[in-house]
Image (spheres, grey):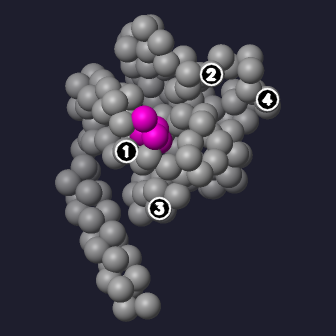
Amino acid sequence: MVICDQIWMEELEAAVFRDDFCKDKLKMLVVEDEPSTASNIKRLLCRRFNAYVDVAADLATARLLLGSCRYDLVTLDQLLPDGSGIEFLIELHHNPCVPRVVMVSALDRSSIDPDPLDLGAFDYIMKDEKMACLLPNAVRRALGMAQ
């Protein structure tokens, strides 16, 4: 119990520091289990938006981070080690402070049921050669930024 409380306090202190550190920056969360893809998305968001970006390799970590920090945007993979992005999207939709979500997946959108856009995702981007161009545009639109 003491160890769990200590870990929780360390996470809370890190979140408070992150919120203080990021006051004037966009905060984004990349939920992606493939390390190289997560790194590429993080780098893209940092460079294009000068954002503070956290990465969660699974839904459990994403839940923890979303509970400790307010994010402006989440990029969400569909296939994760501990669940599906669709299930998480449904869960997020019940949160009163839900950030904008852009799904980023190797799966074709037509193969996912129900459609992520019907569940509250702002956009759906395929992990392909166009992602580096399409993702920043989707993020700008999701956040209501001028092109």
Name the N-terminal-most of marks 1 and 3. Answer: 1
Write down the residue under mark 4: 113
Q: Measured from the top left, where is residue 133 in percent x and y?
A: 39, 10
**What residue would you read off at disc 1?**
55
**Are there few (<14), some (14-19), or many (20+) residues within 10 Å of tag 4?**
few
Q: Residue at x 32, y 83 (%)?
A: 6
- Asked if marks 1 and 2 touch (Cβ < 8 Å), the reply is no
Magenta highlight range: 30-34
Other-residue count near label 3 (Cα within 10 Å), few / some / many at <14 / 14–19 / ≥20: few
Q: Tell me the residue at 65%/42% (across/down).
A: 84
Q: Is residue 141 left or right of residue 50?
A: right
Dot 2 crowding, Cα within 10 Å, few <14, some 14–19, many 20+: some
- Tell me if I can see residue 143 in this picture: yes
Which label number is shown at residue 107?
Answer: 2
Residue at image point 62% right, 40% down: 85
Q: Secondary structure at mark 2?
A: loop
Residue at label 3?
64
Contact flag, marks 1 and 4 (Cβ < 8 Å): no
Q: Secondary structure at mark 4?
A: loop
Which label lies toward us, 2 or 4? Answer: 2
- Which SS type dominates the magenta stretch? loop
Report the amino acid beneath label 1. Answer: Val
| Residues tagged 1 and 3 counted as in contact (Cβ below 8 A) | no
Mark 3–mark 2 CB contact (< 8 Å)? no
What x and y, as percent, mark residue 139? 44, 25
Q: Quick check: 7 left or right of 1?
A: left
Q: Earlier in the sequence, mark 4 or mark 3?
A: 3
The Cα atoms of the two marked residues, 1 and 3, are separated by 11 Å
Which label sits in the foreground, 1 or 2? 2
